[in-house]
Each structure stands twice: as C-alpha cells, then as structure tokens.
C-alpha cells in the first residue's frame, strides 16, 4: 500500500524491518509470560477445565466466519486506503462476526442434544460474542498491518497480556475455577479493544475522517480473493484442532485436558523455531524463486537448522518429562508424560513441514499447502477415530504423529518435481545423534541414580540432551556440522557488523 494510516510516507523496507522486530519481540514476550502464567494456573485448575475450554474453542473456530474468508489478505492488495476500501472491509467484517455468532447460537441446541456439556458451549458462545465485538475495530488493525505498522498492536498486546491474567487467577483461587480460562481470554479481548479505541481516537483520526462507504463490487472482490487464503488457513487450522474434537467426544473432557496440556508443552520447540525461521523463510524463498541452485541451498540450510534445533529441544523434554511435569505442574498432571513423549515427535516434524510450506509459498504454489493439509486432515480423521477409540489420548497422539509424517512425505514428493532436496544427508546426522544421545542416557541413569532433587534431575537430563546431541552431531558428520555451523556464525557476525 502506498498510503500509511497517518498520512506519512516511510520506506517499505524500513517499516518491514522495524515492524518485524516489534512483532517478534511481542510474540516472544506473550509466549514467555503465558508459559509462566500457565505453570501456576495448571496447579490451580483441573484437567477437566482445560479439556472443556479446548473443546469449546474447537466449536468456536468451527463456526466463526471472519477468519475463513481472509479479508485482511484481500485488503492488503489494495494500493490505497480510501473511504470505500475501509468502509467495505468494515461492513463485511461486522457482518461475518454477526454471522459467526448466530451460527454458534443456532448450533448450541444440537450440541446439547448430542451430549456436550454446558461449560463447553459457554466457551464457544462467549468467544463468538467477543469475536463479534472485535469486528467493529478490526479494520483499524488491518490497516496498520497492511502498512507494516506492527508496533501499536504489538505494544497493546504486550501490555494487555499480563493484565488479562488477573481475573483468571482470582477465579482460579476462588469458587469460579471453571471460568478462569475464559476470563483470561475475555479480559485480553475487552482490554485490547478499550486500549485500541483510545489509540484509534488519538493516532488514527485521518481514517475516521474518511467518508466510509460500502461498495458491493469491491466486497465481491474481497470475498473472492480472501476465500482461497482464508479457507486454506481454516483447513490447516483444523489439522491442529480436529484431534480435540475427536478425543473430547470419544474420551471426555478430562482425557482431553491431559492431551491438550501435553500438546501445548510439546509445541515448545516448534514455537521457538516458527517465530524466527517461519518469518524469514517465505521472504528468502520468494527472492530466490527463479534461482533453483541458490533456492536449494537455502532451503537445505533452513531444514538443517530446523532439525538441529527442534531435535535436541524435543530430546531434552523427552528425557526430563516425568521430573519436569512433576516439578512445574504437580502430581495431578503426571498422566501427561506418556502423551507428551509421543507428541514430541510432532514437534520435530512440524517445523520441517512449516519450512516446506514456506517453500511452496515462496515458489508461487500456495495451493499445495491446501492439498497437503487435506491429506493430513483425512489421515487424522480416520486414524484419530480408530486409535482414540482403542487407546484414548495416547492413541490420539499417535494419530497426530502419523498425520504429520504423512504430510511431510507428501509435501516432499511434490517438491521433488521442482528440485531435489537431500533429505537423507540433512536429517541422518541429527537423528543418529539423537539416537546415540538417548542410548548413552540409559547408561548414565544407572550411574547418576534416581534419588536426586527434582530440579537437579531436570537440570542434568536437559544438559545431557543438549550437550550430548551437539557432541554426537560433531562426531557423526564432522565436516558437514563444522562447515554449516561456521557458515551460520559468519552470517551472524556479518549481521552484527
């Protein structure tokens, strides 16, 4: 877009870099604070409460309409911010928010009939109400992001996030435990809207002075363009949500609560990677799309980094899981451990798939992501129903692993038509190093013993997973490991200079 919301012109490259820094900092802050806050909440709340919230969020995401039509992506294609572009986006967003709320309300009697609890439906309806309220101010956030002004939204989110946990803890320590998680989500949304409104009145007055108009032809363009991206994102989102529905329906919300927490913990390695590599990969691949040789080298390097970061972190969680869960969350959450250990395989595979997904976008084939996601969704639905019915939460975890592996293989087979990726050379070293680290760990356990304090047991297991992995990686593929590590260090020094 050529027009900024405040009417000032700033170079696009500068806005992109500055906005990316703010977005990255805000993401890490909210992740870190949410992680610490949930350690204490998990000690106060039961698995059933987490399961009810997770199932309610599934139904909310299923029935809400705003995200399915990707209006923000369509608006970003406009070259100027005018009364017609803003007014059309505002009208569509509010109507979709209302439609999602009405659809959720209409589905509620049927969900009650099929046996879903009132607590689950309260979450779904409340989140739909919040989404409807957010639709009235969402247009301002879209304008800011379309102009790469991520700083205001990042600051508001960073400030509101810790405050939003105050009602959650008050309820968790009192008689309203079942509403604690919903209270945090509601507080974050409402406070964000209030602070955002003050910012709009102060800094975005030029937008308010525009003559907002709804133009039907422009609305059709928005819907046509945004539908493909939005539906694709919805399908990809269901790959990470359908498991909650299947398990919550077949095994109940308590089993889902254990599974949901195990899934969240298992995502730590992926969150660490996606916040950094995910953003860089799309832009890198887009610039190199016509140079297959450099594209292959860059994609291989990013895949190697993903494998060599995700694998040792997942290994550290795998080895320390029983002690770590007991230390951080308490004895009531120990059933999480076997589920977590299975799902850690996904935490290694998913960053690789995210990287390949960025590669599809970079080479101009985003529809491949939808195709792979549909395959994953089909595998998850069939395997999830069978395995969750026979083995509960552990079976559901195995189905998720199977879906992720199949998706990775399908994506790789599609990319082979464009160019060759040396997957064996890239992954053999990290996986062999992980195996050797794990094998030697069993010998070290006999020497160290199991009578250590919890914090010390966690510390030595995490330390061995990380140090052992690096040691064996250097021994298994010494030339490749040293050359690629040296290359990364050279880039880091050049960037610092």
Image: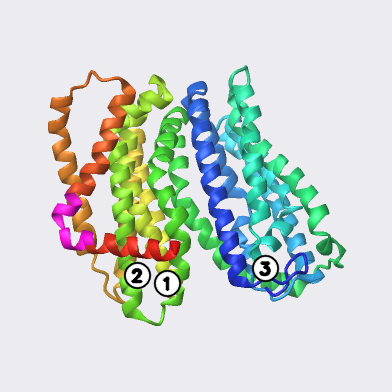
Q: Which residues are magenta?
A: 472-482
Magenta residue check for 477: yes
Is disc 3 in contact with disc 1, using a CB cutoff of under 8 Å? no
Residue 218: image location, x then y, percent:
73, 73
> What residue do we see at 59% from left, 54% from top?
22
Nearer-the-camera pick, 25 or 374: 25
Nearer-the-camera pick, 495 or 116: 495
Is disc 1 in contact with disc 2, using a CB cutoff of under 8 Å? yes
Which of the two discs, 3 and 2, sits closer to the camera? 2
Can residue 332 be seen here? The reply is: yes
Q: Which residue is mark 2?
A: 298
The N terminus lies in which quarter of the figure?
bottom right
SS at badge 3 = helix
Magenta residue check for 243: no
Spatial separation of the CA atoms under disc 1 and disc 2: 8 Å
Can residue 366 be seen here? The reply is: no
Where residue 285 is drawn, which disc sits there? Answer: 1
Residue 17: image location, x then y, percent:
56, 64
**Left-right relation of 184 to 478:** right
Q: Please tell me which of labels 1 and 2 falls first in the chain.
A: 1
Nearer-the-camera pick, 238 or 152: 152
Is disc 3 in contact with disc 2, using a CB cutoff of under 8 Å? no
């Amino acid at each position: 877009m050529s027009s900024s919301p405040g009417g000032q012109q700033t170079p696009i490259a500068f806005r992109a870099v500055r906005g990316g820094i703010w977005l990255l900092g805000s993401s890490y802050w909210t992740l870190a604070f949410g992680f610490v806050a949930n350690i204490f909440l998990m000690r106060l709340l039961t698995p059933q409460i987490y399961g009810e919230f997770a199932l309610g969020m599934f139904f909310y995401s299923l029935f809400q309409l705003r995200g399915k039509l990707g209006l923000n992506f369509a608006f970003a294609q406009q070259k100027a911010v005018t009364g017609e572009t803003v007014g059309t986006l505002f009208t569509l967003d509010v109507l979709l928010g209302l439609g999602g709320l009405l659809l959720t309300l209409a589905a509620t009697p049927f969900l009650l009939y099929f046996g879903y609890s009132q607590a689950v439906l309260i979450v779904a309806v409340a989140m739909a109400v919040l989404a409807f309220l957010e639709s009235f101010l969402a247009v301002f956030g879209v304008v800011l992001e379309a102009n790469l002004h991520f700083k205001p939204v990042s600051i508001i989110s960073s400030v509101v996030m810790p405050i939003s946990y105050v009602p959650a803890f008050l309820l968790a320590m009192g008689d309203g435990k079942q509403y604690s998680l919903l209270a945090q989500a509601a507080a974050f949304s409402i406070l964000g809207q209030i602070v955002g409104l003050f910012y709009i009145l102060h800094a975005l007055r030029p937008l308010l002075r525009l003559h907002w108009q709804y133009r039907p032809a422009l609305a059709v363009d928005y819907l046509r363009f945004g539908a493909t991206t939005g539906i694709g994102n919805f399908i990809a989102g269901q790959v990470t949500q359908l498991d909650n529905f299947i398990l919550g329906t077949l095994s109940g919300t308590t089993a889902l609560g254990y599974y949901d927490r195990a899934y969240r913990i298992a995502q730590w390695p992926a969150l660490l990677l996606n916040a950094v590599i995910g953003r860089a990969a799309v832009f890198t691949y887009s610039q190199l799309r016509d140079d297959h040789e450099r594209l292959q080298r860059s994609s291989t390097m990013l895949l190697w980094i993903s494998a060599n970061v995700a694998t040792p972190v997942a290994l550290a969680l795998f080895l320390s899981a029983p002690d770590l869960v007991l230390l951080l969350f308490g004895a009531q959450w120990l059933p999480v451990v076997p589920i977590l250990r299975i799902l850690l395989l996904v935490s290694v595979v998913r960053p690789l798939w995210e990287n390949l997904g960025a590669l599809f976008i970079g080479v101009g084939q985003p529809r491949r992501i939808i195709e792979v996601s549909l395959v994953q969704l089909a595998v998850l639905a069939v395997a999830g129903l069978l395995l969750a019915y026979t083995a509960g939460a552990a079976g559901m975890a195995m189905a998720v692993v199977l879906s992720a592996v199949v998706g990775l293989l399908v994506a790789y087979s599609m990319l082979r038509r464009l160019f060759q990726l040396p997957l064996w050379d890239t992954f053999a070293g990290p996986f062999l190093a992980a195996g050797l680290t794990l094998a030697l760990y069993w010998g070290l356990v006999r020497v160290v013993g199991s009578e250590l304090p919890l914090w010390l047991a966690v510390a030595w297991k995490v330390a061995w997973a990380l140090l052992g992995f690096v040691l064996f990686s250097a021994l298994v593929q010494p030339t490749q490991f040293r050359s690629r590590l040296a290359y990364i260090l050279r880039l880091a020094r050049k960037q610092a200079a």
